[in-house]
Image (cartoon, rainbow, N blue to C red):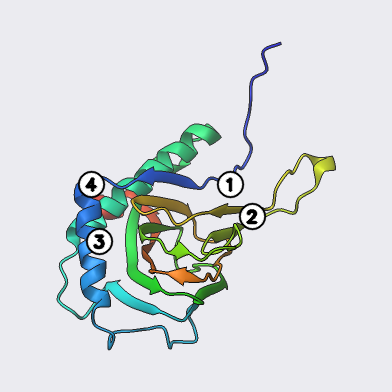
Amino acid sequence: MSLKIAYFQPTIICIDNVPPVEFSKIYNLADALHQNENINDAGDPSISIRGGHQIQVYPNDKNLDVTWLIKYIETICRGYMEIVSQQSGTTDLSLCDILVTSIWTIRQFSGDYQEMHTHPAGSLSGNIYITAPELALNSQPSDSQILFRLPYTRDVNRFVMTDTWKYDPTPGTVLVFPSHIPHTVYPWKGNGNRTVMAFDARLVPKEETLNGNP
């Protein structure tokens, strides 16, 4: 027997390795920003972070030139779009391009976490993992992981086999996912920190980027 597979409206979360040159620059940028404890958006009740530091990278009022980072994020988002087009067998995304709208960095420590949330301003979102903590003995497997709540309920009778997906914060990797998927980050106990560079991007008509807009 040789079965062929068809996918219908798949939920796709992509993982890739960050090229060494880009990762080194991202690591240095995040580390330099987090040295300044006076810059911290974590007290804003409208964002999901609970404890630690969150610092806006783009757009910013710090005279940071992150054009190189924007280009890298655009490249991986376009790669995501190509995978979705291949899996779905449609050409709709060929009419679209991607526009990075926000980049920020988060550094959290033992006991810190992020509440369940979505990114309503984006079409695609992602995390670039920079550092991961050394977990204490007897930690739970989910400690410090990110969990995604997928848009369906597990139901074996309908061949829906899972409704969540988890990922360990692996330095040097990047996740790209649809912005509407709820996700949370579990707290942990141990040493070190969990540092990410996160982003939002939205789909725009291709002629907007070709013409230099917006």
The amino acid type found where label 4 is placed reads Pro
Circle nearer the N terminus (4, 1): 1
* Residues under numbered marks 4 and 3 in contact, where contact means CB atoms less than 8 Å apart: no
Alpha-carbon span between mark 1 and mark 3: 29 Å
Q: Is residue 50 left or right of residue 35?
A: right
Q: Mark 1, mark 3: which one is toward the viewer? A: 3
Alpha-carbon span between mark 4 and mark 2: 31 Å
- Pointer 3: what residue? 27
Name the residue at 62% across, 34% down: 7
Circle nearer the N terminus (1, 2): 1
- Pointer 1: what residue? 11
| Disc 2, SS | loop
x, y (%) of residue 58? 27, 70
The amino acid type found where label 2 is placed reads Leu
Q: Nearer the viewer, residue 101 or 169?
A: 169
Q: Is residue 96 visible?
A: no
Name the residue at 43% across, 52% down: 175
- Pointer 2: what residue? 150
The amino acid type found where label 1 is placed reads Thr
The dot on residue 20 is: 4
* Residues under numbered marks 1 and 2 in contact, where contact means CB atoms less than 8 Å apart: yes
Alpha-carbon span between mark 4 and mark 1: 29 Å
Alpha-carbon span between mark 4 and mark 3: 10 Å
